[in-house]
Image: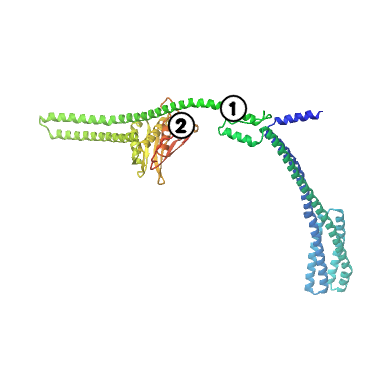
Amino acid sequence: MTRRPAKVWLSRKVSRLGIGHRLALSYGAIIISLIGLSDAAVLKLKSLSEATREALQVEYPKTVLINQVNHQLDIEARAMRNALIFNAESSRAQYEAEIASATLRMSAALSQLDAQVHDAVGRDLLRRIRVVHSAYTVNQDDFIVLLNQRRLGEARNLLIVDLHGYQMDYFALLEQFNRHQETQMLAAGQQANQAYVDARELIFGMAALALVLSALVTALFRRSLLRSLGGEPEYAVSIARRIAAGDIQTAIELGDRDSSSLLHVMEFMRQRLTERDEALRRANADLQGSVNTLSQMQAELVSSEKLAALGSLVAGVAHELNTPVGNSLLAASTMADATHQLERRLAQAMTRATLNAYIDEMHAASDILLRNLSRVGDLISSFKQVAVDRESSQRRQFKLHEVVNEICLTLQPSLRKTPYLLQAELPQDIEMSSFPGPLGQVLTNLINNSVLHAFEGREQGRIQISARKLGADLVEISVSDNGCGIPVANQKRVFEPFFTTKLGRGGSGLGLHIVFNIVTGVLGGKIRLVSQVDQGTTVTLTVPREAPDDPIGVLPVAGAV
């Protein structure tokens, strides 16, 4: 009776978990099981590695050393036999050297075996080999002494009787040691093979268990998922696609057990979307009216900004004309007074000095008059060209440096009231077929923007205009200042309409917005702004030398630079 409530409680707890949590717990259990089995497999493989190492690094080198001792013993036996047969002085010395060398190698091999052999049988065999080796070495030394003393008969008897017996014992012990090592190697190989079989069976068992657990978890997960979806996923996906495509009137078939399924939630969402769609339609109608009103207001503000800029230009030119016109009037009145005085003196006797003074005065006055009138003519000519270009916005052929110089000339009167310096350094070989009026408005707005924003609180500043060719079809025009720069947070918003940091203090937020529209629309180019705080700002225009045939005005994307 206690198992069923516990099972029901566990089922309820599991059903409260999300699908992702269930999947994570299920596969987490599988992964933990596989990790445990992997650790067991690693231990089995470790034992396999140790058994293999034992066979290859411990047992096999012993066999090699025994074979080496056996080989050296054979060399000694052959060398002693040959030394007895070939008893010449030269050959005897050679065979003695072979015997000594073989003896040294045998001793070295036996020392290595002594360090590597640890089992009781091996140690006993090695002790017996040592005993035979000592006796054999002593008799071998006696044999060499007899050979050197030319006592060949005694040497032959020693070789046949004693040394031959020790050799047989030596070979027998080495053969016995070899068989013992073969037994050791066979046991090590069997151990390694058994470790391999155990590891293989464990890995196959792990794979089978992982397959069974994965199939079981997949089946349980599919059952839980279908229950949560309210049916096959294809139906839920098709309903979701219809709703996403805007068909919120589609009917959803709900079953008796779908009160907590995804389909039930989707039906609730569809009803809410229907209600919000109606509310959005009404809100969109109201917003469209507001947008139309704002668009009209924006157009009026842009027009006002253009007129304000032109009015400022006219005021500046008028102020600049005031000085040369006043100087001209002063010179003309001086000439008139001098002429009246000369006329009165003509009624009396007039000296040459008086006439020369009059002529000098007329020369000076006429020079002043000509210079000032020439200045007035240049200003009026430049103002007329700029005004015509702005008013007509017609395409024409022009040299870039001439248009820029005319713009700088018309702006100089207003800039003379400030401590700021305007410089233009442009090559004289850049010819364009574009719209000088909109280009002039762009440069004027950029210069006025620098005057208004860049040099606040500064007693001096410099605005630099430069240009260069980019290939055969593009021109790059840069307007830079050494002012206070633009904060990073504002750099992506400077071209947005109505964005200004001088609202109510001379800034409308439309100057750079108009610049962006003209450059990207009328002139068919691109604009880029680079600025660092306290180091200045550079605005770069990249425009084609030949403007597009059908220029259009475009609104800038928010944050575009």
**Crowding near the residue tagged with mark 2, few <14, some 14–19, many ≥20 C-alpha atoms within 10 Å:** many
Q: Estimate the x, y position of residue 24 in percent, counting from the top left.
A: 69, 36
**Residue type, mark 1 in image:** Gln
- Between circles 1 and 2, the one closer to the viewer is 1
Tally the marks: 2
**Crowding near the residue tagged with mark 1, few <14, some 14–19, many ≥20 C-alpha atoms within 10 Å:** few
Q: Quadrant of residue 400?
A: top left
Above or below residue 296? Residue 193 is below
Q: Is residue 538 visible?
A: yes
**Residue type, mark 2 in image:** Glu
Q: Callout 1: helix, strand or loop?
A: helix
The residue at 15%/33% (across/down) is: 354
What residue does disc 2 label?
A: 496
Relative to the observer, which residue lies in front, 231 or 325?
Answer: 231
Which comes sooner in the sequence, label 1 or label 2?
1
CA gap between label 1 and label 2 equals: 39 Å
Relative to the observer, which residue lies in front, 394 or 544?
Answer: 394
Relative to the observer, which residue lies in front, 412 or 28?
Answer: 28
What residue does disc 1 label?
A: 271
The N terminus sits in image quarter: top right
22 lies left or right of 495 = right
544 lies left or right of 372 = right
Q: Quadrant of residue 556?
A: top left
Above or below residue 92? Residue 374 is above
Numbered label attached to residue 226:
none
Q: Estimate the x, y position of residue 279 in percent, counting from the top left.
A: 53, 25
Q: Estimate the x, y position of residue 251 in percent, counting from the top left.
A: 60, 30
Q: Is residue 502 visible?
A: no
